[in-house]
Image: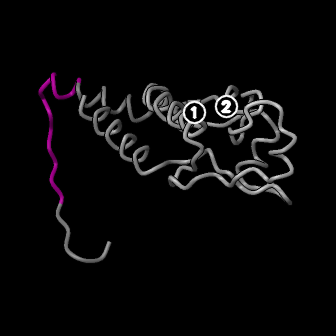
């Protein structure tokens, strides 16, 4: 490393500090509990987007095409909701290294990213509030 540097060696003989450091190291090696907890918050925020009909950035989803709106039999005013399957299949997967939120339904990607005549209507992602909640949860996790 270029520049100035110094080294400081500290030997810890304090059992309580050593125990806390071991707990912190264990937490950082396996973030599954953190990802499970924060995953619930983010999963609920994603579900709430269906109620608000907005993307993570707060913009409204593209309106239904007039042709589809005319033939839609159920939930006529709700975008991305015919029977509620897309919202109902949202799941989270947490492990020691990652958190994933999504749907197993193939057409979920079509609605998230758009395709052909179907405009993108993003429902997955982090809003500004979600990002802050994630940072707050991480801070809480590291200080407990």
Closer to us: 76 or 140: 76
Q: Residue 60 in the image: x percent, y percent?
A: 58, 53
Closer to us: 59 or 114: 59
* Secondary structure that dominates the magenta span: loop
Q: Quadrant of residue 89?
A: top right
Where is mark 2, residue-wise? 87
Where is mark 1, residue-wise? 47
Residue 62 sits above or below residue 52 on the image: below
Mark 2: which secondary structure?
helix
Q: Residue at horizontal 71%, vertical 55%?
A: 120
Q: CA distance from mark 2 to mark 1?
A: 6 Å
Q: Residues in magenta?
A: 7-19
- Number of numbered markers: 2
Indicate how the structure is coloured in the image: one colour
Q: Residue 22 in the image: x percent, y percent?
A: 30, 28
Residue 83 sits above or below residue 67 on the image: above
**Quarter placement of the C terminus:** top left
Q: Residue at horizontal 32%, vertical 32%?
A: 141
Q: Residue 84 in the image: x percent, y percent?
A: 72, 28
Circle on res. 137: none
Q: Residue at horizontal 57%, vertical 35%?
A: 51
């Amino acid at each position: 490393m270029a520049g100035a540097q110094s080294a400081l060696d500290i030997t810890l003989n304090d059992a309580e500090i050593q125990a806390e450091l071991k707990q912190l190291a264990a937490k950082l090696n396996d973030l599954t509990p953190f990802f499970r907890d924060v995953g619930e918050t983010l999963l609920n925020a994603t579900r709430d987007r269906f109620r608000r009909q907005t993307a993570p950035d707060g913009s409204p989803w593209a309106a239904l095409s007039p042709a589809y709106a005319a033939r839609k039999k159920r939930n006529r005013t709700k975008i991305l909701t015919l029977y509620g399957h897309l919202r109902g299949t949202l799941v989270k997967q947490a492990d020691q290294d990652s958190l994933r939120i999504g749907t197993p339904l193939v057409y979920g990607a079509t609605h998230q990213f758009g395709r052909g005549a179907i405009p993108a209507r993003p429902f997955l992602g982090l809003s500004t509030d979600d990002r802050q909640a994630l940072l707050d949860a991480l801070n809480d996790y590291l200080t407990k």
